[in-house]
Amino acid sequence: MFAFVLYRIGIIFAILFIGALARRVNILTKETTDGLCRLAIEVTLPFLYFYTLSANLNRGLFLSIWSMPLWAVGLTFVSLVLGWAFSSGLKSDLRQRRTFLFLVTFGNYGFLAIPLVYALFGQEGLVIVSVFNLGVAFLYWTLGLVILTGVKGKGLSVFKNLFNTATFALVSGLIVGISPLTPPKFILEVSQLIGNASIPLALIVVGSILAHRDAPRNFSFRTIFSLVFCRNVLTPAIVLLSVNVFFALPKMILAIIVLQAAMPAASTTPILTAKFNGDTDFAASAVFFSTLFGIITIPLFISLAF
């Protein structure tokens, strides 16, 4: 099983390498990478979510996986507690500690997890991970921004970032999937075509982001090691042990939960830190090393989940 998972992940990382190479030879620049990242987040991934849920989800399947958003909340809580425990002991400034906490709390649940789940489990796995990401999207755009900015928000203003195309696509796809509604074939085919571009586009964007590490280092490698250990090893180990001991889940659902727990730090973090005054240099290097170590830790934990 380890060899099979490693092979599938090897294909994913080969595409990451192509994206990184395109960045290093200046086919992709920071500006084009940022534009492609927005295209993936705001256009292609939402279409992929909508098509996957509206075309493949039904009421019976939803009733069997309805708890996936709750598992996303539980995973985020575990990661948050671990990140807080580790970040509180860092000899870093406040911006870096907040960025550290965000990186540990939120893994690469979209850009990297979706291609991996599709490669390992096909369309059924894609439906499950899309429902899982309903919980992720809610926390990412609320709790995540509170972590980065340190601003608690006034009243309901903290929820304003939830109004985006990805969340809309997830919710609308879920409603269409579990209802008797049947979208016109034209809409489904357009959604499928655009959504199919998501996986290679997202991986090339991640590779390009990882290749950009030219800024001077303003952090210790001890900090990076702490983040990688917490995000890549401790979080999936705790989740795997807890789920195996306390819950009896189908193998595919268990594997997807553990896969999400084993995801490296979210590759979009450098973009968010630039926008919300986080430590972008640290975020870029942390994503690089976390993803690099993921080549070993991801197949290891998925194999243990089977």
Image: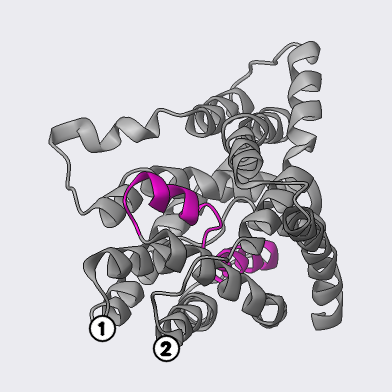
Checking the image for residue 290, the label placed there is none
For image coordinates 42% across by 69% down, the residue present is 104
| Residue 278 percent across, percent down from the top left | 34, 56
- Outermost residue on the bottom side: it is 222
**Three-letter amino acid code of the residue under disc 2:** Arg
For mark 1, does the 10 Å Cα neighbourhood hold few (<14), some (14 to 19), or many (20 or more) residues? few
Taking the magenta stretch, the answer to whether it contains residue 199 is: no
Q: Residues within 10 Å of mark 2 (few under 14, many from 20)?
A: few
53 relative to 65, above or below: above
Would you say residue 4 is visible in this rendering?
yes
Q: Considering only vertical position in the picture, is 281 above or below 40?
A: below
Residue at left offset 80%, top offset 73%: 5
Residue 127, picture quadrant? top right
In this rendering, would 142 be left or right of 29? left
* Viewer-side residue, 254 vs 280: 280
Residue 77 showing in the rendered view: no
Residue 252: image location, x then y, percent: 69, 63
Quick check: 170 above or below 244? above
Image check: 108 left or right of 55?
Answer: left
Q: Nearer the viewer, residue 292 or 104?
A: 292
Residue hosting label 1 = 91
Left or right of residue 229: residue 144: left
Residue 79 shown left or right of residue 156 in the figure: right
Separation of marks 1 and 2 at Cα, in angstroms: 10 Å
State which quarter of the image contains the N terminus. Answer: bottom right
Q: Which residue is at a point 80% across and 51% down the rendered structure image?
A: 122
Callout 1, which amino acid? Lys
Going from N to C along the chain, the mark reached first, 1 or 2, is 1
Q: Magenta region's main secondary structure?
A: helix
Range drawn in magenta:
251-278
Residue of label 2: 222
